[in-house]
Image (spheres, rainbow, N blue to C red):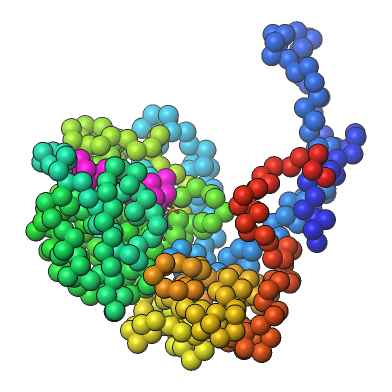
Amino acid sequence: MLSQVKPIFEKSQPGRMGVALPSCDVPGDISSLLPENLRRSEDPGLPEVSEVDVIRHYTNLSQLNFGVDEGFYPLGSCTMKYNPKINENAARLCGFSNIHPLQPEKVCQGALKLMYDLSSMLAEITGMEAVTLQPAAGAHGELTGIFLIKAYHRKNGEEATRTKIIVPDSAHGTNPATASVAGYDVVEVKSNDRGNVDIEALKAAVGEDTAGIMLTNPNTLGLFEEDILQIAEIVHDAGGLLYYDGANANAILGKIRPGDMGFDVLHLNIHKSFSTPHGGGGPGSGAVGVGKRLLPFIPTPVVVEENGTYRFDYDIPDSIGKMRSFYGNFGVLVRAYAYILSMGAEGLKAAADNAVLNANYIMKRLEGDFEIPLASRVCKHEFVISGEKQHKENGVSTLDMAKRLMDHGVHPPTIYFPLIVHEAMMIEPTETEGKETLDRFVDAMLEIAKEAKEKPEIFHDAPYTTVVSRLDETLAARKPVLRWSPSER
Ligand SMILES: *Cc1c(COP(=O)(O)O)cnc(C)c1O
């Protein structure tokens, strides 16, 4: 198998060709048309391979990876659902894919309408006043949102005194990182024994120096913050604003809106919740929605409509300005637009129902064999189990079990996050999986619990059936080999 990983350079044979270029039809000596200093003096050293060599090379490479088109991918806090292929067709329509960002507005009315309509739909879904589609990913959306909060306090003459952002201990790592990059001090509040923000701890943390709070609801334990209205009141009364991390919105679509919960600003990971797959490092989109308080500060330009004509509006005096070159990752926006239109309002609601049902189904089936903190509560789209029992009793860690899952043909869930659960394993099935897939996953997990008891030693070298088996993660982090080099062979 590993021989398939061989770089294409090594398959090169002098004189072999994959394409036949037409002969040059420029009259005269073309080499004299190029200035001397721009001419290539050495052979570029490109691989010389046949067409079948190239096709097999890339097809083999694609099969070394595990993808959502191949099997179950229950990556908690990273909604990784099936991506309807019709969205890909839509994004590839040449009117969308061949468009240039510097084209005049009058020749790209369709693209502007798509952005206008998508913003309106996302504003409706989240209960916000307006949505900017500029940010390139979730964390970039967070930065945009925190800049908006900062602009608001600046306008009120409080930028210098409101220096703190509150973040619960269950937060996604990007939240404190964003607050810190934006120049804020991060104050952590702990969770209570129901897995929610501890109200007394929150009251003690807020004050005249509070710029805002960053929350996810349902939180990263997959649990709904039942006291959200009280939390909003406490923060607003202290003069702070509320930021909603809407990266994984599956559980709330059509059910409840962050705007109605009291949030002033949010981001959505379009590349998680609205069907563009992520994880391969492809483009993302972190659309940001703003409520009344932050509307005056929204990034420019904004698409506006007048008598059926669309244009960019740059005239927003208090805007924080542009957050990105041009207008966002447009192809991702086309996929989201196609997804929302094909699902419809009822479809989005059904997605939320099924995401929650699927998560609860798995949680209940695993309950007897794994430690599940707070399994007594109904979870939302995801839940967290602890590998503490297997770790203590059998010396098998969560990492070992995650590796072993690959031998069962399943991509492991998110592990060691959130940090507040020991040996955490965070499972999010998403709405797109049927009962048979969920059962296969649960059966694999139960088999692993049994193996941990009966033959814990097999875990040390797992996985056995993948292209590469257990990696030395420390070496991989300290001495990563990131490019091919003939000298290392
Ligand atoms: C994925 C995720 C983010 C960050 O999104 P990126 O697009 O990776 O920057 C932020 N918050 C939560 C809860 C997430 O799951």
Per the image, is 146 magenta?
Answer: yes
**Residue 364: x %, y % from top left:** 44, 88
Which segment did they paint magenta? 136-152
- Left/right placement of residue 396 relative to residue 209 reads right
Q: Is residue 12 something that shows in the picture?
A: yes
Q: Against 81, is 239 above or below?
A: above
- Left/right placement of residue 468 relative to residue 368 reads right
**Residue 62: x %, y % from top left:** 69, 57
- Left/right placement of residue 392 relative to residue 258 reads right
Report the front residue among 15 and 440: 440
Report the front residue among 469 and 4: 469
Quadrant of the rendered image containing residue 259: bottom left
Q: Residue furthest bottom?
A: 368
Give the prevailing secondary structure in the magenta stretch.
helix
Quadrant of the rendered image containing residue 244: bottom left
> In the picture, which quadrant includes the C terminus?
top right
For ligand 1, give the image quadrant.
Answer: bottom left
Q: What residue is drawn where x is 34% and y is 55%? A: 175
Report the front residue among 134 and 20: 134
Per the image, is 204 magenta?
Answer: no
